[in-house]
Amino acid sequence: MNKISVIITAGGIGKRMGGDLPKQFIPLGGKPMLLRTLECFYHFDANFELILTLPSDWHAYWKESLQKFNCTIPHTLVSGGDERFHSVKNALDSCSGALILVHDGVRPFVAKETIQACLEVLATNEAVIPVLTIKESVRERQGSSSHAVDRSKFLLVQTPQCFRSSVLRDAYNMEFHSGITDDATLVESLGIDIQLIQGNEENIKITTQKDLIIAEAIFANQNKV
């Protein structure tokens, strides 16, 4: 079986959340959000090679948190870069897996079924990402006006975004530019087809105070006694 590396990106400082504590360290059910995310992948498969990107200034804080919560999950800590692109590029140096999953550190509710579906499709393809369909009506803005568009043509992208190692490494040999919004965009620019699987709605990206309220509700629902 191919070894699998998981890059968990937490290189940002979470300005949209407010406060001095980066969003990845905000408590969720009593533990730092980032630790919840790390546990998701470790509990799915303890053999995953876990690589975590963090701003250098917060490495000591993270290590203190691990001690506080008695976390012994094996993982490699890598310094994050100025952009997500640079954080992932730094982390690739620590990846030895034939398959690489890239996940947002502030998505602590990725379902085991989502990870499993990604890996099953990746077994016979080069790239796969989880997506959700859009429920609301969608409009496209054009200057001061707008018009309705067919929402069935659009999808919401989640993580983990999953790739053959050789494909992702080739993609990250490219120069950074502002049009790179995620790993799939970068890989797609090489002419690689991106396969899609159904994500899970709870797999939200927690970036604002309102997101955090929703996250607490999801956590409480998932941990009912």
Image (cartoon, rainbow, N blue to C red):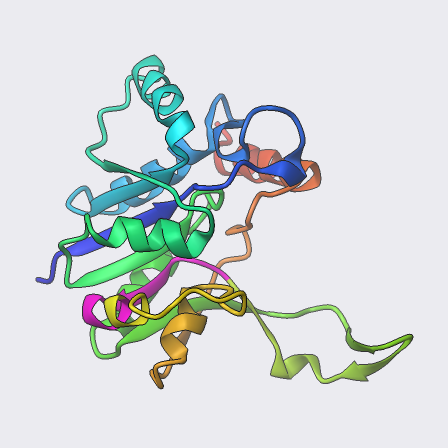
Q: Does residue 167 sit above or below 182 in this rendering?
A: below
Please identify the quadrant where the N terminus is shown: bottom left
Residue located at (20% from left, 73% from top): 123
| Residue 22 pos. (x, y %) | 53, 31
> Where 178 falls versus 192 (above or below)?
above
Q: Residue furthest right?
A: 144
- 52 left or right of 76? right
Front position in the image: 185 or 213: 185
The residue depicted at 41 percent of the width and 26 percent of the height is: 58
- All told, the count of numbered labels is 0
Q: Residue furthest top?
A: 68
Tell me where residue 135 sits by quadrant: bottom right
Q: In the displayed orientation, state which residue is furthest to the left.
A: 1
Check the image and report above or below for 170 versus 158. Answer: below
Give the camera-side residue of 139 and 82.
82
Say whether residue 215 is left or right of residue 148: left
Vertical placement of 57 versus 205: above or below? above
Image location of residue 184, percent across then percent down: 41, 70
Residue 199 visible in rendering = yes
Does the magenta run of residues contain 152? no
**The image quarter in which residue 52 lies:** top left
- What percent of the width, then of the height, locates residue 185? 45, 72
Q: Is residue 50 left or right of residue 47?
A: right
Of the pair 85 and 193, the residue shown nearer to us: 85
The stretch of residues the image draws in magenta is 158-168
Residue 112 appears in view = no
Determine the residue positioned at 65% across, 70% down: 134
